[in-house]
Image: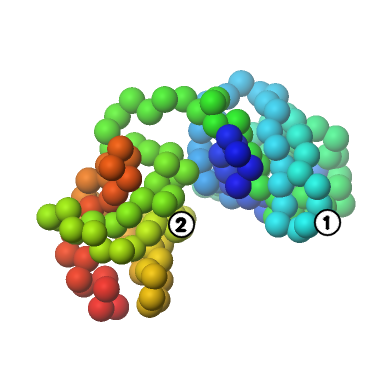
Amino acid sequence: MTEGWISLGQLGKPFGIKGFLRFNVRETVLTEFKLPIQLKLRKPDPNFPEKEITVLELQPHTGKFIVRIEGIDSPEAAERLTGGILLLPAHLLPKIQTKDEFYISDLIGLEAVDQSGNKLNWTLREVLENPAHPILAFTQKEGPEILIPFIHIYVGEVDLEKKTVALIHPEVWNEV
């Protein structure tokens, strides 16, 4: 990822005739900023250069969001941005005030431990969005990916200082 920038989510397909795009949010913090706001846009396509863009509008729409970006005023122009990742400067992220809230970017790379603190040699690779609850996707040095629902009956303490996440009964997930 671009150093010092946090992924807010990915642009989806165009929405409507005015150049809006669907926005699959990874971090909802964008709703707390006064618009317009300058962000970076990056695509996995090596032929698409990373560039700065200005988000003019952000609107909730059927449980997700739609965005309007400066200079994008038609579905055809919006289509070229589909799949792009919106990045926010990390220093603009508001400080989290409670123990049980985290930015997704803070969780990536945490090491899994059991309730006793024993390392499991699993690394949190991604937090997947799911209608019921987020899902933690762990990788192992050898073996398949392990998916664990991010709910209190399966996930214990998240310690950002120690860079660990405690899993409750991890042996159940290792056998799946």
- Amino acid found under the numbered disc labelled 2: Glu
Q: In this view, does 119 lie to the left or right of 76?
A: left
- Is residue 32 positioned above or below 173 on the image? above
Residue drawn at point x = 37 percent, y = 69 percent: 140
Residue drawn at point x = 38 percent, y = 63 percent: 138
Q: Which residue is tagged 2?
A: 126
- Is residue 72 positioned above or below 57 on the image? below
Evaluate whether residue 61 shows in this view: no
Residue drawn at point x = 41 percent, y = 52 percent: 109
**Label 2's element?**
strand
**Mark 2 nearby-residue class (10 Å; few <14, some 14–19, many ≥20):** some
Residue drawn at point x = 17 percent, y = 64 percent: 169
Q: Nearer the viewer, residue 72 or 127?
A: 127
Q: Which residue is tagged 1?
A: 47
The image shows residue 59 at horizontal and vertical percentages of: 62, 36
Q: Considering the image in quadrants, where does the C terminus appear? A: bottom left
Q: Earlier in the sequence, mark 2 or mark 1?
A: 1
